[in-house]
Amino acid sequence: MKTHFASVERANESDNNNYWSKTVCGTESEKVDDDWDVVSCKKCLSQKNEYEKAENEAVEHSCNDMAEFMQFQDSLIKN
């Protein structure tokens, strides 16, 4: 059975469950992992670069939003 890639939101103190996203290739599967080294699905692996690029862009966008918010907060303090 192939191992598919899916991201996981780790549980927190009040919730002991892990919540898996859809697999990158869209296949419904019980065998998923968030470590690319163990993924064996060729469809998932073929989309790895696109997935990582989108993930990096999302992180960069989030960081830019936080930086802009901090600049705004600084401008309020100075005024």
Image (cartoon, rainbow, N blue to C red):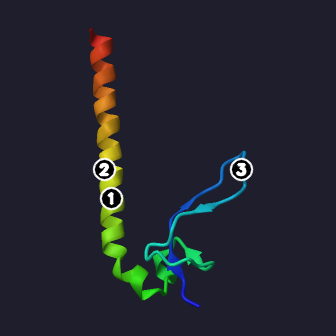
Amino acid type, label 2: Glu
Amino acid type, label 3: Asp
Q: What residue does disc 3 label?
A: 15
| Disc number for residue 32 | none
Q: Are marks 2 and 1 in contact (CB under 8 Å)?
A: yes
Disc 2 crowd, CA 10 A, few/some/many (<14, 14-19, 20+): few
User: Residue 70: x, y in percent?
Assistant: 33, 28
Q: In this rendering, is residue 64 above or below 11?
A: above
**Regarding mark 3 in the picture, which secondary structure is present there?**
loop
- The N terminus lies in which quarter of the figure? bottom right
Q: What residue does disc 1 label?
A: 56
Report the front residue among 74 and 31: 31
Q: Are marks 1 and 3 in contact (CB under 8 Å)?
A: no
Disc 1 crowd, CA 10 A, few/some/many (<14, 14-19, 20+): few
Circle nearer the N terminus (1, 3): 3
User: Residue 49: x, y in percent?
Assistant: 31, 73
Amino acid type, label 1: Asn
**Regarding mark 1 in the picture, which secondary structure is present there?**
helix
Could you tell whether 63 is left or right of 6 in the image? left
The mark tally for this picture is 3
Question: Residues under labels 1 and 3: Cα distance?
Answer: 27 Å
Question: Residues under labels 2 and 1: Cα distance?
Answer: 6 Å
Q: What residue does disc 2 label?
A: 60
> Which of labels 1 and 3 is toward the front?
3
**Regarding mark 2 in the picture, which secondary structure is present there?**
helix
User: Residue 77: x, y in percent?
Assistant: 33, 13
For image coordinates 28% across by 12% down, the residue present is 78
Circle nearer the N terminus (2, 3): 3
